[in-house]
């Protein structure tokens, strides 16, 4: 059982994880961040020791959870000298990047965290992987404590990468579609508020049906006149016109 | 006050409108559809007279609501011979397409309706327009009865078209992003379920903040390594790779 955790990183993921682990009775032993300011912010928030120096890390913990950016991780693990289970929280990195530790794992939460905005939905998946089966068991148990056993996924690195790429389309790109919509409204002095009910309904629809069934709109109907009219409206912005063409064609192709 | 309505059309919009009008005390006088089967289905559902013949339409009603496809409307209005207020429900058609009627209006509900799936959210905007101010008042009053006064928007045709185009991005295109995500998961034998919590959270985020602030992901962070890795994963599907490139660049450009 994982009872003592050292957090390596103090960004969005580490902040969420620190708080949710603590509220589930897991002891946060220490917070490290390369920025003292960040380490202090999260350390004080959790009432735990903190430092910007890797040498200050406690030598004994059940889990060293690395929640830093993908770019920063390689350099960090080369300087990390600890025993026990070390797990990263990345959606795209191989478990191999921490293979210098005999006990290595992955604990990838599939959610969009931001420090300033509390999550509306506490249910989300956690994807786990480990080099040793006892550690896999411990990570699954810990994940189940946080999100419920039905939301724990045991995935290998290839599967996890596919999930991460799919999440980019489903979350980052759909959000960018909202942003384009906001700009198109602004041109006619209209507020984004008018779209909020439609956006939520569109997302909630795919709770009950698959996205292909849920698809509506001119491209799905093959309504050429409306699409031509839209292209004319998009003349002032070639980028959006190019996106309109490519996405409409992709919908038409997959009708 | 609009107390008696004739529905022209029996598709998704007409079905929703018929039911919600009736449950708000408005009398549905008649249902027309060019397909007798559809006219009957909705007529029976609402307990009202129906026909597939335009000549059967009652000559006296407070509102003739045209809810047929954009393509079908011109031919239909050329054969329609009624007095009183005639309004269409299209997001893209000019009010002028029904200018052969002295009393013309638009009653455009900004929502994604489907006959088989009940709406989760009863709050959505209705955009109204009319050639006469007394009719504009009546349409606003009717819309307020259905969705509340705060969700009634008085828009001219240019504004309404901008809203429709924005809705294509915010709803149809975000849904297509979900569909691509589903396909990417299938390749690794993963179920779409894993993404549902993230999708809903992404949509709910923009209730509280604007989409630009809410944007996350590799393109927003400028994480070139992750994007290159994603491009490699998308090699088997040039369409998705092209979309990935275009959307990522659009995000980077607007950071």
Image: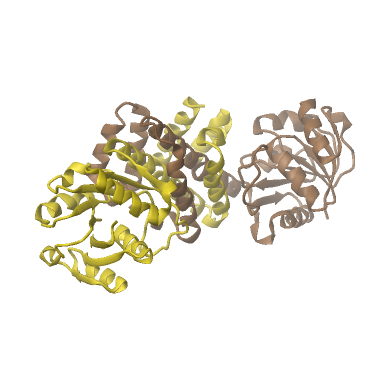
Chain colours: A brown, B yellow
Q: Could you say which quadrant of the image residue A71 lies in?
A: top right
Can residue B232 be seen here? The reply is: yes
Give A160 or B113, whichever is nearer the viewer.
B113
* Left or right: residue B35 compared with residue A143: left
Give B98 or A91, whichever is nearer the viewer.
B98
Give B241 or A123, whichever is nearer the viewer.
A123
Can residue B223 be seen here? The reply is: no
Residue B97 in percent (x, y) is at: 17, 45
Residue A29 higher or lower than A156, as above or below: above
Residue B248 in percent (x, y) is at: 48, 32
Give B67 or A114, whichever is nearer the viewer.
B67
Residue under the image location 90 percent in, 42 percent down: A60
Total tally of numbered discs in the picture:
0
Residue under the image location 64 percent in, 40 percent down: A117
Question: Where does the N terminus of chain A fall, quadrant-wise?
Answer: bottom right
Q: Could you say which quadrant of the image residue B49 lies in?
A: bottom left
Residue A122 higher or lower than A13, as above or below: below
Q: Could you say which quadrant of the image residue A147 lies in?
A: bottom right
Residue A84 in percent (x, y) is at: 84, 44
* Left or right: residue B102 compared with residue B175: left
Residue B8 higher or lower than A131, as above or below: below
* Left or right: residue B10 compared with residue B240: left
């Amino acid at each position: 059982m994982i009872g003592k955790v050292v957090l390596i990183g103090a960004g969005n993921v580490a902040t969420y994880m620190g708080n949710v682990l603590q509220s589930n009775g897991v002891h946060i032993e220490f917070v490290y961040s390369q920025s003292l300011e960040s380490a202090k912010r999260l350390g004080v928030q959790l009432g735990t020791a903190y430092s910007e120096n890797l040498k200050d890390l406690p030598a004994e913990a059940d889990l060293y959870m690395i929640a830093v950016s993908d770019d920063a991780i390689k350099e960090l693990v080369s300087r990390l000298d600890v025993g026990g289970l070390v797990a990263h929280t990345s959606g795209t990195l191989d478990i191999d990047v921490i293979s210098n530790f005999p006990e290595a794992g992955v604990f990838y939460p599939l959610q969009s965290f931001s420090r300033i905005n509390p999550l509306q939905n506490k249910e989300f998946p956690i994807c786990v992987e480990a080099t040793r089966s006892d550690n896999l068991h411990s990570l699954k148990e810990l994940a189940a404590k946080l999100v419920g056993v039905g939301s724990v996924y045991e995935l290998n690195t290839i599967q996890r990468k596919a999930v991460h790429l799919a999440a980019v389309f489903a979350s980052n790109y759909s959000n960018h579609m909202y942003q384009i919509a906001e700009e198109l409204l602004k041109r006619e002095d209209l507020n984004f508020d008018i779209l909020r009910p439609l956006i939520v309904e569109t997302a909630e629809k795919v709770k009950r049906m698959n996205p292909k069934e849920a698809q509506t709109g001119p491209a799905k109907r093959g309504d050429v006149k409306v699409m031509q009219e839209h292209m004319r409206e998009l003349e002032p912005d070639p980028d959006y016109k190019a996106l309109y063409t490519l996405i409409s064609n992709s919908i038409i192709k997959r009708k």
